[in-house]
Image (cartoon, rainbow, N blue to C red):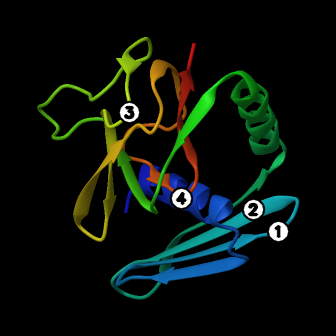
Amino acid sequence: MDLKDIQNLIKFVAKSGASEVKLEMEDIKITIKTGTERTETTILQQAPSGIPQMAVSTATAQAPAQVADSVVAEAAVKYIEITSPIIGTFYRRPAPDKPVFVEVGDVVSTHTVVCMVEAMKLFNEIESEVSGKIVKILVEDGTPVEYGQPIFLVDPS
């Protein structure tokens, strides 16, 4: 498990509302505890001999996430959100060697496929329920999304 995977896991747990998540694999143990004001993560990786090699503890304030949420909320007043209908991993393209479904500035209509969300090894095409122009992509490719999480902003005018 590399650092990017751990960071994505922290973001996913923080958004999920879970108060504590423990993940134990052969050579690594991760505990993520969330509170109302901060998220604390402790990672303990063991060497084959059983001696701890790496222990990392981080605490991240939730204030930046709250600021980002308020910016999205202000933009959502003018725009319509396309939200994720399921929990899974967000992908902007059907395959790594294929072009993205939509870019900022593209005009979409109802039933236009805008992305895919993978859940339990099933890839689900997500269609737009509104017509308009994509003004913002709110989620990075390959990151976890939750049910109801806004993934695109569309200008309906």
Q: Residue at x 33, y 39 (%)?
A: 115
- Marks 1/3 in contact by CB < 8 Å: the verdict is no
SS for dot 3: loop
Using the numbered discs, state the Cα–Cα distance from disc 4 to disc 1 in whole angstroms: 19 Å
Mark 1 vs 3, N-terminal side: 1
- Marks 1/2 in contact by CB < 8 Å: the verdict is yes
Q: Look at label 3 and name its amino acid.
A: Thr
Q: Look at label 4 and name its amino acid.
A: Glu
SS for dot 4: loop
Q: Residue 113 sits in which quadrant?
A: top left
Neighbour tally class for label 2: few under 14, some 14-19, many 20 plus, Cα within 10 Å: many
Using the numbered discs, state the Cα–Cα distance from disc 3 to disc 4 in whole angstroms: 22 Å
Residue 62, numbered label:
none
Residue 131 in picture, x, y percent from top left: 45, 25
Residue 39, numbered label:
2
Q: Look at label 2 and name its amino acid.
A: Thr
